[in-house]
């Protein structure tokens, strides 16, 4: 039996027929509190089942995943229209791309090797209290107690601790998709268990803000249609007004707190792309639960305005009592265009008058909304952010979605992991402290017209570039992370590493280093052409830290 194994960086994407980076590694330097990942590419001239074991002084902190291939059915919008995509795509043709990460357990650690590539993802979570020094990591393939092959990697733990992540990071969380794809009743115990698993996985991917459906999110829903009702608040209309039961919200927040989620978003209070209508809200009246507000409700109707004047104070009072209000963000409407500014202004003024100082955030890319004082925290797309960078905004955010496909960072399946991860350096350079992306687990076709199987289509049935709509895959009892999600986690670590050096030098020093190594002015629309850039920058930062350490002890 002839087995070939290659140790590759976490930024490689190994196709069945080709390879982009081919960055082999045998050692690495890591910080305390850092997550380090690399990959194994395994090929054998014989097809057989083998067991995989890891041997290391860091054994308890190592997780192994088998990489599964996802079907990239729509690499780019450009590919769909036969237009020219930028040169940084790995492919513009539908194909299989490694993305799905299935953990191997101590009890179930068997994989099948063959002439086709078998890929493993090795993750090492370096403890913050670990001693400095070199830690070998050996991965062993065995069968019938016979060692077939072994790889060897040396990790040198340096005397620095990676700072905790301070970036606010949300990918919109859809509890209705969880109920639908797993076939469980909304807010049954089975549903709550799955919600907990999806939130746990979100936190493991670096997400620290969760879209919380106190009312149904008015997102990606066809005009006149509804999605599965997942409203957390139980609302009753009485002769005196409205009564609110937030017991399910309390349970939701307990789960968030359990996994270190620090922030929540309240769904948009008005419809998407224009703020003309109310979200779908259900109210119990005379013992009957009915669809009281929705597409049939004008956003400025007296009935809905009166409802908001009771709903928002009751909600904020509840959040204040639970200790969450200061960590809560409210939305008006998603992605309004300039032609919607009058309607948006009317609704924003109403909400601001009721919320009285609570944080309001929205994804929008026209600077006029911010200059008119309609939104506290604007979230522009990364290809529209330039005008916002010169403004004195108290919280700088950025987002991307399906439209940001040329010349900027994104997490499409057909993009390299480098292009996914580079946004961390861009965010650090420009002081961006928040990131939003719309699809953590959106398992619908466009406008939620019908459900899709994420293992058959990664594009929402050709609605979005593959990988745009979700970053996790449903499993039997929860969610499986993706290579794309873990690449973004590494982007957050890049920000933390830059801050570590900044704390020992200055921000200007680190920014100069970023541009010097790139041999260009790094901006959101200007990505370094050399995919080794992140490795070179990282090593230079570690060298600078070492210089300072030597100076201190000289």
Image (tube, rainbow, N blue to C red):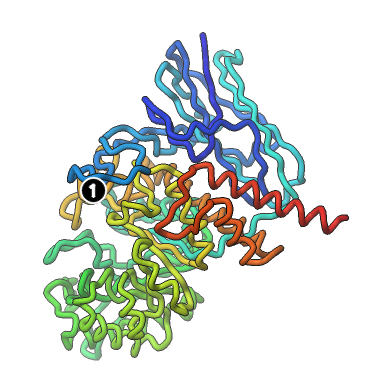
How far from the left and from the top, in percent, is residue 122?
55, 36
Query: Where is the C terminus found, in terms of image quarters?
Result: bottom right
In the image, 531 versus 377, the foreground residue is 531
In the rendered structure, the answer to whether residue 369 lies left or right of residue 338 reads: right
Mark 1, residue position: 77
Q: Can you say whether 209 is above or below 420 in the image? A: below
Residue at image point 19% right, 57% down: 447
Q: Residue furthest top?
A: 1
Query: Dot 1: what SS?
Result: helix
Q: Position of residue 26 (x, y in %)?
A: 63, 31
Q: Nearer the viewer, residue 94 or 176?
A: 94
Image position of 146 (left or right of 360) = right
Residue 474 seen by the camera: no
> Residue drawn at (40%, 38%), measured in percent from left and top?
100
Please tell me how crowded label 1 is: few (under 14), some (14-19), or many (20+) other residues with Cα within 10 Å. many
* Callout count: 1
Residue 367: quarter of image: bottom left
Work out whether 1 lies above or below 136.
Answer: above
Asked where in the image residue 337 lies, by quadrant, the reply is: bottom left
**Residue at x-position 35% and y-position 61%:** 383
Q: Residue furthest front?
A: 519
Decide if residue 153 is on the left or right side of residue 177: right
Q: Is residue 429 visible?
A: yes
Comparing 189 with 422, the one in front is 422
**Toward which corner of the image does residue 353 lie, by quadrant?**
bottom left
Work out whether 92 lies above or below 377.
Answer: above
Seen in the picture, residue 124 relative to 345 is either above or below; the reply is above
Where in the figure is residue 456, as x and y percent of width and height?
25, 38
Name which residue lies at 21% across and 50% down.
463
Residue 471 is situated, as x and y percent measured from the top left of the image, at 38, 48
């Amino acid at each position: 039996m002839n087995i070939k194994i290659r140790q590759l960086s976490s930024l490689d994407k190994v196709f069945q027929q080709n390879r982009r980076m081919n960055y082999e590694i045998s050692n690495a330097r890591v910080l305390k509190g850092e997550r380090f990942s690399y990959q194994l590419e395994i090929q054998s001239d014989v097809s057989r089942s083998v067991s995989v074991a890891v041997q290391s002084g860091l054994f308890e902190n190592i997780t192994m995943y088998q990489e599964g291939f996802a079907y990239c059915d729509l690499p780019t919008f450009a590919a769909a229209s036969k237009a020219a995509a930028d040169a940084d795509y790995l492919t513009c043709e539908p194909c299989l791309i490694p993305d799905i990460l299935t953990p191997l357990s101590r009890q179930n650690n068997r994989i099948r090797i063959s002439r086709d590539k078998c890929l493993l993802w090795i993750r090492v979570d370096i403890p913050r209290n670990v001693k400095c020094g070199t830690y070998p990591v050996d991965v062993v393939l065995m069968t019938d107690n016979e060692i077939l092959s072994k790889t060897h990697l040396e990790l040198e733990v340096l005397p620095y601790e990676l700072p905790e992540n301070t970036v606010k990071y949300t990918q919109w969380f859809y509890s209705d998709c969880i109920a639908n794809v797993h076939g469980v009743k909304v807010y049954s115990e089975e549903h709550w268990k799955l919600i907990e698993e999806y939130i746990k996985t979100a936190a493991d991917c670096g997400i620290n803000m969760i879209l919380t459906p106190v009312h149904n999110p008015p997102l990606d829903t066809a005009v006149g249609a509804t999605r599965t009702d997942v409203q957390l608040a139980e609302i009753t209309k009485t002769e005196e007004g409205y009564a609110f039961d937030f017991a399910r919200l309390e349970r939701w927040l307990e789960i968030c707190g359990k996994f270190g989620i620090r922030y929540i978003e309240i769904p948009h209070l008005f419809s998407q792309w224009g703020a003309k209508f109310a979200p779908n809200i259900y109210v119990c009246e005379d013992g009957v639960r009915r669809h009281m507000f929705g597409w049939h409700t004008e956003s400025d109707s007296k009935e809905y305005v009166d409802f908001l004047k009771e709903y928002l104070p009751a909600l904020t009072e509840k959040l204040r009592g639970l200790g969450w209000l200061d960590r809560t963000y409210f939305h008006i409407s998603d992605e309004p265009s300039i032609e919607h500014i009058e309607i948006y202004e009317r609704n924003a003024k109403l909400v601001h008058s009721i919320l009285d100082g609570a944080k309001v955030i929205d994804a929008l890319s026209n600077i006029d909304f911010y200059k008119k004082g309609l939104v506290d925290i604007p979230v522009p797309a990364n290809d529209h952010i330039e005008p916002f960078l010169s403004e004195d905004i108290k919280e700088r955010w950025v987002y991307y979605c399906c439209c940001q496909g040329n010349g900027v960072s994104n997490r499409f399946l057909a993009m390299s992991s480098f292009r996914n991860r580079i946004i961390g350096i861009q965010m650090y350079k420009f002081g961006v402290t928040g990131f939003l992306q719309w699809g953590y687990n959106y398992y619908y076709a466009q406008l939620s017209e019908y459900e899709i199987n994420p293992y058959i289509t990664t594009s929402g049935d050709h609605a979005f570039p593959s990988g745009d709509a979700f970053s996790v895959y449903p499993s039997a009892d929860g969610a499986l992370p993706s290579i794309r999600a873990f690449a973004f986690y590494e982007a957050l670590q890049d920000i933390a590493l830059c801050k570590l050096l900044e704390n020992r030098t200055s921000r200007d020093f680190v920014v100069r280093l970023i541009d010097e190594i790139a041999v260009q002015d790094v901006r959101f629309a200007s990505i370094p052409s050399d995919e080794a850039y992140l490795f070179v920058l990282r090593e230079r930062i570690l060298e600078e830290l070492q210089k300072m350490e030597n100076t201190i002890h000289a």
